[in-house]
Image (spheres, coloured by chain):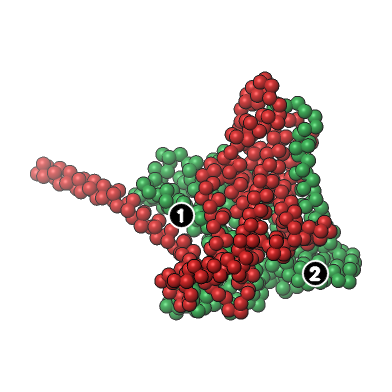
Amino acid sequence: MSAITSQSTTLQQQERARSDALRHRLYPVFMHLIMATAVIIVSFPLIYAFILSTQSSHAGTLVPGSAMIENYQEAWRQASMGLLMRNTLIVALAVSLGKIVLAIMGAYALIYFRVRGGMIILGLIMLTHLLPLPVRVVPTYELLTELDWVNTFQGLTIPFFASATGLLLFQQFFRTVPTDLADAARVDGAGPFRFLVSMLVPISRTNIGALFLIEFVYMWNQYLWPLLVANSDQTRQIQIGIKLLVATDAVIQWGTVMAGALMAIIPPLIVLLVLQRSLMTGMTASTDDV
Amino acid sequence: MGTPVFKNRILPYLLLLPSVVLVTVFFLYPAAQSMELSLYRVHRVRNVEIYVGLENFQRLFESTTYLNSLEVTAKFVVATVLFALAISLALAVGASQPIRGFGVYRTLLIWTYALSPAIAGLIWALLTDPAIGFLTDVLARFGIVFNWRRSQGDALIFIVMAAVWKILGYNILFFLAGLKQIPRDVIEAASLDGANSWTRFWKMIFPLLMPMTLFLLIMNTLYASFETFGLIDITTQGGPGRATNVLVYNLYNDGFKSTSGIGLASAQSIILLGIVAALTVFQYKFVSRRTFYQ
């Protein structure tokens, strides 16, 4: 009798173990299904935009049309996409690089030198956090008019150069660099400039990559400031160019508009793909700010 | 601060000088001017400036347009931030599961970070277009009429959807970075596989993600409040009626589309400054104590 009971218990246990094993094997499959669905849902608006950009007459169908080349050519021509890309690239690159250089300079001064009133200077730069553009937009615009910088690249870039984010990022990173490194460099006769350029900058490349990604995307996607200060063909920025593409006709030409919008996404997307790993590692060290 | 290594009296100040000059010229000086102008009645064409004390603020808080704008902004920001955080947390936790092949999802979920709010708005305008919008079609099949060009309620929902979609990539990227910092054995012990996974997630993983969540809460609030101007300008332009007339859009109209609104716009800038200051205080109190992300 007892033999039979114990046998049935083992059977039950075996069965449970087997169903557990099955669950464990099915779990990844199940999760793959869920995540694949999630990716499709999140990406669907973009996929739909792409399908529309290939159609000549729009019926809201999911079948790609044959007018892809015409739509992209038309958008390129109508929006002067080449010029927009050039203008925006100049601004995004200038601001990203300018911010990186200024942030490294500032952080280097604060960490590696004795700076009287360093905390006050740091506090001053941190105040930029309190002052996003809308808080000072009217006077800044008037200042730009006085400087005669409307419709110039100076006007689109220089007001953005100061970077509290970058300063914090590099300050935090420089603190983790062993002091021995600078001491050794000094013993070897390297001056502050050589130490910065040949030691500190190379080991900061993850942080440089992270900051470049953040600032490039941020500048590429600027809207309010370029809307106010860049209305000439030679300085117009891409987001405003897309806005004009929408407003050209009384009825929105979705094929052309979407072709233009999708082309405008490509440069920041490339930067994101290339540098996303830098951002992941560079940012976990300092989530204070973006 | 670490021990200074280099002895040089002038160099550090020269290195800091450009930043200080730029901050003073393009941030502090205009902000001070905003404060000053908020106390004046300014007419751009007639070139008149009259000191009026707090009249601009009084006018704002008596204006139904401005009060409506405050209400619209509050609704928009709260809805955007809540949905953006909830959805991105769920997606990031899913994508961070230690399952073979999941790296693909991690890449495919962060790309909306590269989008601008304006283009996100355009794409959602296409999806919800009355004639050819896919979403319009799907909703119509359930008997739901969705038209943000006519309905004020729909317009608010529309800008929330587009704003949430755009910020998902950013949030997922940071949640993934936060999840990566969590020790592997904790992740495995709290695997979504098995009984009580829901409870175990909230008890074991979420507390470790709390600093990141608070950080994103602040960043998303700033994003929804200040960075969504393009989204609104390219689609609803504040309408229909004033349904999507958020604070920044209202400020833009007063400051740049009217000849006598500079004082009024400056007063609005100062109110925005108050909002940012409150958020910053919150951030320094609760967010900068990052236990798990050093």
Chain bearing tag 2 is: B
- Look at the image and give the colour of chain A: red
Secondary-structure class at tag 1: helix
- Residue tagged 2: B261
Secondary-structure class at tag 2: loop
Query: Which residue lies most toward the left here?
Result: A1
In the picture shown, does residue B282 fall above or below B252? above
What is the distance, in whole Å, between disc 2 and disc 1 at their CAs?
Answer: 45 Å
Q: Earlier in the sequence, mark 2 or mark 1?
A: 1
Q: Left or right of B173: which side holds A133?
A: right
Q: Residues within 10 Å of mark 1 (few under 14, many from 20)?
A: some
Q: Left or right of B282: which side holds B120?
A: left
Amino acid beneath label 1: Leu
Q: Is residue B65 visible?
A: yes
Residue A233 spot, x, y in % from top left: 69, 64
Q: Residues within 10 Å of mark 2 (few under 14, many from 20)?
A: many
- Residue tagged 1: B108
Q: Residue at x 62, y 65 (%)?
A: A80
Q: Residue at x 45, y 51 (%)?
A: B106
